[in-house]
Structures are given as structure tokens and as C-alpha cells.
């Protein structure tokens, strides 16, 4: 199973926690990386694949060393200087500067930089809601909205059944 590891956040934490490599080797142990909870909590933005099965056989110092030695390729926007891990993401970003929106809605004429955004927009016109909540009966036109909604179920505590029914 591959996980994404936010390498740069991890490196920042490491550098702020240890003054040098020697203290890192002496102090760093499985208590910092127990069940990889640190990795799971900061794994959003880096494009490096991280193998959880391999990590469980590595010492935490080896995991840290692997993260420090990873250098993602940076693709920098020549207009504003933002950097991206891949050329594809940079190309999507460049559309914000050029204003080119090649994907146009055939119903309302609204234009988009990406075909996937047009597909999601088109569901407004068709009424299609393919993303169903696994807890209640609600459905959504786009994945991110459905995930945001599902999070509302996770930590919600209800005093009685009436509140549950009102929520649904």
C-alpha cells in the first residue's frame, strides 16, 4: 500500500527537533513514529510514494534519512514563481496567467481550464449526483463536496434520535 509522505513538513519538524545528525540518531526512536501516525497526519502535499510495509521494517532513523535525501523535481512558474512537483501541475497553473479556457459548457457557455472541472460543472445541468454518502441518503455532484459532507458524520454526537433525523 502506497502512502504520500509530506516530506518537506517532516524535514522541517526534524530540523527543529534535532540540532545535528548525531543527536537525531541518538534521540530518534520508534516513539516518534509509532505506527507511522506522524506520517499519516502530514501526508497531503508531496508526490513521493511511501511504502508503509517497507517503513515498518525500517528504523525511524532510516525513515527520516530517506525523507531528508528525497529531492523532488521542482517546476517553477516563470510568471509568479510558484513551484510544482510535476510539469502537468505547472501547465494547469499556467492557465491562470494566460486566461485560456479551452473546455466550454455546451449549455451555458461557461469555460474551464480542465476537462474534469467541466464534467463536474455539467452535472449542475443534468442533475447527476454520483457520489453518495455512506452514512445518510445525501448525494453530491463532486467528490470533494461528498468527502467534506462525510466528515460531518465522524465526530457528531447526537443527544437523541430526533437530532439524527433532522441531520439526515
Image (tube, grey):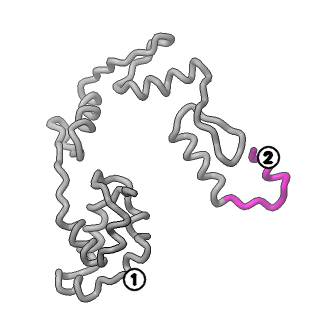
Q: Which residue is mark 2?
A: 166
Q: Residue 87, image x and y in percent? A: 21, 38
Q: Nearer the viewer, mark 2 or mark 1?
A: 1
Q: Give coordinates of residue 61: x percent, y percent.
A: 26, 78
Q: Secondary structure at mark 1?
A: loop
Along the viewing direction, whichever of 122 and 77 lies nearer the viewer: 122
Q: Is residue 92 left or right of residue 119?
A: left
First to last magenta residue range: 156-168
The reply, left or right, for residue 113 in relation to residue 76 is: right
Classify 10 Å Cα crowding around label 1: few (below 14), some (14-19), many (20 and above): few
Indicate the quadrant containing the N terminus: top left, top right, bottom left or bottom right: bottom left
Secondary structure under badge 2? Answer: helix
Rounded to the nearest angstrom, the CA distance separating label 2 from label 1 is 43 Å
Tell whether position 22 is magenta. no
The residue at 64%/36% (across/down) is 139
Q: Which residue sits at x=44%, y=23%?
A: 118
Q: Position of residue 34 (x, y in %)?
A: 42, 77
Q: Is residue 150 left or right of residue 49?
A: right
Mark positioned earlier in the residue sequence (2 or 1): 1
Where does label 1 land, which residue?
A: 31
Q: Relative to residue 144, is residue 62 drawn left or right?
A: left
- Determine the residue positioned at 37% across, 66% down: 53
Amino acid at each position: 500500500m502506497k502512502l504520500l509522505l509530506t516530506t518537506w513538513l517532516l524535514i522541517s519538524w526534524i530540523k527543529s527537533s534535532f540540532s545535528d545528525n548525531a543527536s537525531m540518531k541518538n534521540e530518534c526512536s520508534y516513539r516518534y513514529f509509532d505506527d507511522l501516525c506522524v506520517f499519516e497526519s502530514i501526508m497531503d502535499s508531496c508526490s513521493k510514494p511511501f511504502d508503509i510495509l517497507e517503513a515498518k521494517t525500517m528504523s525511524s532513523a532510516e525513515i527520516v534519512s530517506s525523507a531528508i535525501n528525497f529531492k523532488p523535481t521542482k517546476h517553477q512558474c516563470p510568471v509568479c514563481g510558484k513551484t510544482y512537483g510535476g510539469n502537468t501541475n505547472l501547465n494547469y497553473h499556467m492557465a491562470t496567467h494566460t486566461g485560456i479556457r479551452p473546455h466550454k459548457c455546451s449549455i451555458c457557455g461557461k469555460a474551464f481550464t480542465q476537462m474534469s472541472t467541466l464534467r463536474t460543472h455539467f452535472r449542475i445541468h443534468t442533475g447527476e449526483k454520483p457520489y453518495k454518502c455512506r452514512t445518510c441518503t445525501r448525494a453530491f455532484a463532486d467528490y470533494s463536496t461528498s468527502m467534506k459532507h462525510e466528515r460531518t458524520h465522524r465526530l457528531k454526537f447526537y443527544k437523541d434520535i430526533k437530532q439524527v433525523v433532522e441531520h439526515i
